[in-house]
């Protein structure tokens, strides 16, 4: 969640420096959630990250460590699949809006992703807002950056030295180092009072005795663990790369593979004073070097359950002053200059449209060349005069630089409740000569919308939408 949060402010920094095209690794490049895509906590994060991704200038799902192709979640987690699919479909419906913004970026030096200070410079309080932004002139976007359904469990506690004993009764566990990743050559032997390493251990630690390097090595811890309190424990290992743990000679954790730091635990019911025989094996291949014997005690597990019970699905959004705002999902209209709060499902997030905005939408398509003459929906969000320039080209070449492109200016006259569609400027080979436009004057719940459909053939036309 912290990494997702950082992408928003980082992206705004890039955009406000004048770079219009920016993106990031939707879902996180390295995913250090135990179980990866099988962990419901990561799947919730992925769904929220994807909602942020569709409101990047470039929409891109990318990374390693987990399988994240959206179709995989259709059976694995249908609610997450519905969220991923709905977001992707919205992105594709927004293609006419996105093409208009892209033309404006090329033609005027515009940026799609905009810190609130760019469009509301007279409101100093907005200059410190770095989790909410404008996406073009119409949309206010606030990605959700915390768990609402599956809170990420707090890090397991390192098993304290007081609970560990070597076979000969010393505090801690016996630690043996080996050169090679499969215990090929014994290197050194010592007693580890606390099993919590990030080699080379600080401060400015050196290579453990006997090892040639910290590149490829293995290690083994043996001894006993005494249970501190009765109840259900999650006892396990956090490691990078491969690790295994045996309890009373039974294999309880098996993560014997190269991978980033992650925790894998085994849940069991234990009684106070119970003694378990413990063995942990570890190998280091490359990258990070982490190994920690850890547990979630019954008290910590109870705290985690209570946090789950109290989790809040509400989100508050600060709306800039000076205009009104429509909730994109519900149509509810809000005054600017206030915080609005409501519950959000996994398929929705804070998304508002500025009153006095024109939003062109296309159909749900699978690629940009599909249905080139499909009808478009032109949404008018009333409250002030508005304008938007539609842009189109062949979608494949640079011939637009030679003038093979077409633009159409849309202008909403608030006083006369009329949409003026200008004459098409320019043309290109393969251009759709005619297109049906469904014009919708948006209205809050309980009030009737005004809707009309016209066949636009490139000639200027005015569309009155009533009072």
Image (cartoon, grey):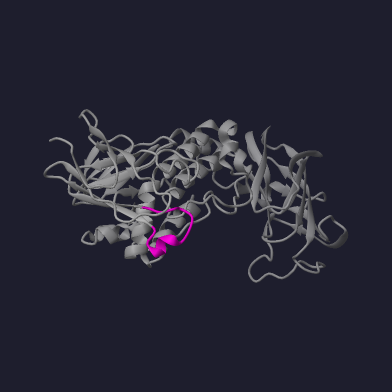
Q: Is residue 279 left or right of residue 229?
A: right
Whether residue 393 is in magenta: the answer is yes
Q: Is residue 49 left or right of residue 31?
A: left
- Is any atom of residue 228 visible in this view? yes
Q: How many marks?
A: 0
Q: Is residue 65 above or below residue 20?
A: above
Q: Give the image quarter of residue 217.
A: bottom right
Q: Nearer the viewer, residue 49 or 104?
A: 104
**Rendered residue at 44%/45% (across/down):** 51
**Rendered residue at 56%/33% (across/down):** 74
Check the picture and name the quadrant holding the C terminus.
Answer: top left
Q: Position of residue 113 (x, y in %)?
A: 37, 57
Q: Main secondary structure of the magenta part?
A: loop
Q: Residue furthest right?
A: 185
Q: Position of residue 60 (x, y in %)?
A: 51, 51
Q: Position of residue 210 (x, y in %)?
A: 82, 67
Question: Which range of residues does the magenta coloring cover?
Answer: 392-404
Q: Give the image quarter of residue 11.
A: bottom left
Q: Nearer the viewer, residue 252 or 430?
A: 430
Q: Position of residue 151 (x, y in %)?
A: 50, 40
Q: Is residue 180 above or below residue 350?
A: below
Whether residue 163 is in magenta: the answer is no
Q: Nearer the viewer, residue 231 or 330?
A: 330
Q: Is residue 302 above or below residue 185?
A: above
- Is any atom of residue 171 visible in this view? no
Q: Give the image quarter of residue 268.
A: top right
């Amino acid at each position: 969640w912290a990494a997702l949060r950082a992408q928003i402010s980082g992206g705004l920094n890039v955009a406000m420096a004048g770079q219009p095209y920016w993106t990031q690794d939707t879902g996180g490049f390295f995913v250090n959630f135990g179980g990866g895509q099988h962990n419901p906590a990561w799947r919730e994060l992925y769904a929220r990250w994807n909602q942020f991704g569709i409101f990047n200038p470039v929409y891109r799902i990318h990374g390693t460590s987990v399988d994240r192709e959206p179709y995989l979640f259709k059976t694995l987690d249908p609610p997450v699949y519905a969220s991923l699919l709905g977001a992707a479909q919205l992105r594709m419906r927004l293609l006419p809006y996105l093409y208009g913004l892209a033309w404006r970026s090329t033609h005027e030096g515009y940026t799609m992703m905009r810190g609130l200070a760019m469009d509301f410079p007279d409101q100093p309080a907005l200059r410190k807002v770095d989790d909410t932004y404008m996406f073009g002139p119409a949309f206010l976007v606030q990605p959700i950056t915390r768990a609402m359904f599956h809170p990420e469990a707090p890090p397991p506690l390192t098993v304290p030295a007081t609970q560990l004993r070597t076979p000969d009764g010393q505090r801690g566990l016996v630690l043996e180092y080996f050169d090679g990743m499969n215990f090929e050559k014994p290197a050194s032997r010592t007693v580890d009072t606390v099993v919590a390493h990030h080699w080379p251990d600080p401060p400015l630690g050196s290579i453990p005795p006997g090892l040639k390097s910290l590149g490829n090595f293995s290690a083994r811890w043996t001894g006993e663990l005494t249970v501190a309190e009765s109840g259900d424990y999650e006892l396990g290992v956090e490691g990078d790369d491969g690790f295994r743990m045996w309890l009373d000679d039974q294999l309880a954790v098996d993560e014997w593979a190269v991978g980033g730091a992650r925790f894998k635990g085994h849940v069991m019911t234990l009684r106070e004073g119970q003694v378990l025989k413990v063995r942990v094996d570890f190998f280091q291949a490359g990258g990070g070097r982490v190994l920690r014997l850890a547990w979630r005690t019954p008290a910590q597990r109870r705290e985690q359950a209570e946090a789950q019970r109290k989790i809040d699905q509400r989100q508050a959004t600060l709306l800039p002053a000076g205009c009104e705002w429509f909730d994109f999902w519900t149509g509810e209209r809000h005054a600017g200059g206030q915080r609005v709060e409501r519950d959000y499902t996994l398929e929705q997030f804070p998304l508002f449209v500025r009153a006095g905005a024109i939003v062109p939408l296309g159909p749900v398509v699978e690629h940009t060349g599909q249905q080139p003459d499909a009808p478009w929906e032109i949404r008018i969000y009333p409250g002030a005069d508005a304008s938007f320039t539609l842009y189109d080209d062949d979608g494949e070449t640079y011939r637009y630089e030679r003038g093979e492109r077409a633009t159409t200016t849309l202008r909403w006259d608030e006083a006369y409740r009329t949409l003026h569609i200008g004459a098409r400027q320019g043309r290109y080979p393969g251009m759709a000569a005619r297109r049906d436009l469904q014009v919708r004057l948006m209205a809050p719940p309980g009030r009737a919308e005004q809707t009309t459909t016209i066949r636009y053939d490139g000639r200027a036309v005015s569309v009155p939408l009533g009072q």
